[in-house]
Image (cartoon, rainbow, N blue to C red):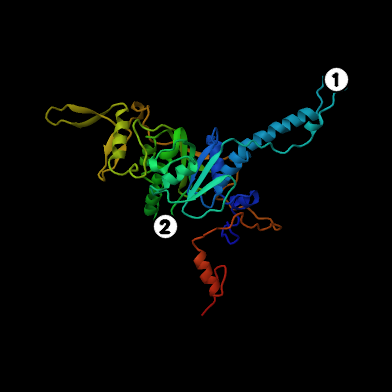
């Protein structure tokens, strides 16, 4: 979010600096919260891939400071305006001595409602500037050693000598806005993103409480339905959401998993994560056994002329060895759990800014400095070399 951004007309880019957010991605989380009420009854949160900290900043201002944004802020403002109008305008049947209270005629500041016993832990490989009330860890979410660090941050009484990889005081919400450095090769980028998502899920399974929530960034692609089916093993409801602040031209979306319900006997561990070995295959098979039996017609017997039929459950193995759930062609026979075509929702009010539109900039605009300059940008060395060569902002001197 520096001054040299190529897209200065992006409304969310400018609005984030005006409202004090570290990055425009803060609006994505706020719009997801408007749609799914993610912060309801939430006091313990883990923010994965947190740098530069915009999502952690939202958590700090909403949970610790007690601020309201979006629809909640509008509802609070509307309610206070109604109270003020009821005090200013005298009812027709009011006595002559009726006088409105002075406190009702004055505009009041929004009332803050901070929550008690809030615990927020942010993890990222990149260094992140500190935030009020946020515990920051510089760690790799794909490494097993990260779990003890996270458990110690969540519970100071945790003893790493116990080798336990499950939180004694689990969290209510796990967020992950991480994405790989894209290469432009879509298949490769999608694969790396899916592996990052599985790493975030494995870590979330270690710390989430039953009934908890998990939100992560995904790249929508051809076979993404398999990902939804695997998520449905652990969560009662899986929804794909596209915030209005996310550009429509991007394959980015967010998978929202609600009501965490781990399978019976499941023990999370990063040393043996899901998707490795036959653990995931067994879990998919056990889940499929709970589904109704689907009758599948086979080819007609050429000798007898009769049709043979067999009963099978909706679980298959592809040529590449991947086990997945599949819907029958007739969905009327398969209305119970196991339907893994996740619903898709567009989040954000239609009156909000369009992330793909370019808005006119007034002539008297003031260019704002970034709220938080990058602490360790990957292009830092390139800037130093460019400055040493005598150039700046994309221009270099000729030898």
Which residue reaches farthest right?
Answer: 96
> Disc 1 marks which residue?
95
Provide the secondary structure element on which disc 1 rests: loop
For the question of whether residue 285 can be seen, the reply is: yes
Q: Disc 2 versus disc 1: distance between alpha carbons?
A: 74 Å
The label shown at residue 184 is: 2
For the question of whether residue 245 can be seen, the reply is: no
Which residue reaches farthest left?
Answer: 303
Q: Is residue 186 above or below residue 384?
A: above
Q: Is residue 352 above or below residue 328?
A: below
Residue 388 % position (x, y): 54, 74
93 or 204: nearer the viewer: 204
Residue 225 % position (x, y): 37, 40
Quadrant in which the N terminus is drawn = bottom right
Q: Describe residue 399's horizontal placement relative to residue 194 as left or right.
A: right
Residue 103 % position (x, y): 79, 32
């Amino acid at each position: 979010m520096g001054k040299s951004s190529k897209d200065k007309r992006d409304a969310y880019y400018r609005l984030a600096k005006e409202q004090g957010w570290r990055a425009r991605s803060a609006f994505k989380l706020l719009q997801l919260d408007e749609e799914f009420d993610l912060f309801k009854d939430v006091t313990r949160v883990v923010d994965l891939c947190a740098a530069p900290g915009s999502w952690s900043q939202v958590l700090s201002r909403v949970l610790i400071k007690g601020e309201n944004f979006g629809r909640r802020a509008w509802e609070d403002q509307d309610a206070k305006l109604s109270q003020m109008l009821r005090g200013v305008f005298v009812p027709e049947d009011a006595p002559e001595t009726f006088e409105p209270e002075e406190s009702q005629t004055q505009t009041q500041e929004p009332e803050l409602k901070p929550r008690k016993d809030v615990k927020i832990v942010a993890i990222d490989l990149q260094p992140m500037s500190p935030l009020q009330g946020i515990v920051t860890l510089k760690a790799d979410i794909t490494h097993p050693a990260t779990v003890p660090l996270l458990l110690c941050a969540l519970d100071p009484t945790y003893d790493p000598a116990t080798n336990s990889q499950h939180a004694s005081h689990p969290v209510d919400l796990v967020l992950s806005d991480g994405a790989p450095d894209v290469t432009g090769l879509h298949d490769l980028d999608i694969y790396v993103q899916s592996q990052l998502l599985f790493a975030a899920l494995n870590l979330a399974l270690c710390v989430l409480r039953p009934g908890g929530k998990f939100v992560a960034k995904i790249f929508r692609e051809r076979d993404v339905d398999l990902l939804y089916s695997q998520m449905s093993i652990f969560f009662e409801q899986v929804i794909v959401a596209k915030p209005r602040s996310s550009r429509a031209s991007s394959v980015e979306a967010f998978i929202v998993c609600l009501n965490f319900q781990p399978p019976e006997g499941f023990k999370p561990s990063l040393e043996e994560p899901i998707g490795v070995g036959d653990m995931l295959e067994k879990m998919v098979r056990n889940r499929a056994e709970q589904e109704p039996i689907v009758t599948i017609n086979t080819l007609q017997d050429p000798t007898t002329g009769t049709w043979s039929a067999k009963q099978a459950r909706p679980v298959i193995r592809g040529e590449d060895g991947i086990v997945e759930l599949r819907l029958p062609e007739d969905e009327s026979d398969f209305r119970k759990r196991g339907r893994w075509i996740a619903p898709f929702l567009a989040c954000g009010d239609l009156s909000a800014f369009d992330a793909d539109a370019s808005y006119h900039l007034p002539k008297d605009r003031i260019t704002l400095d970034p709220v938080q300059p990058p602490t360790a940008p990957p292009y830092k060395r390139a800037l130093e070399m460019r400055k040493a060569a005598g150039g700046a902002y994309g221009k270099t001197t000729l030898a």
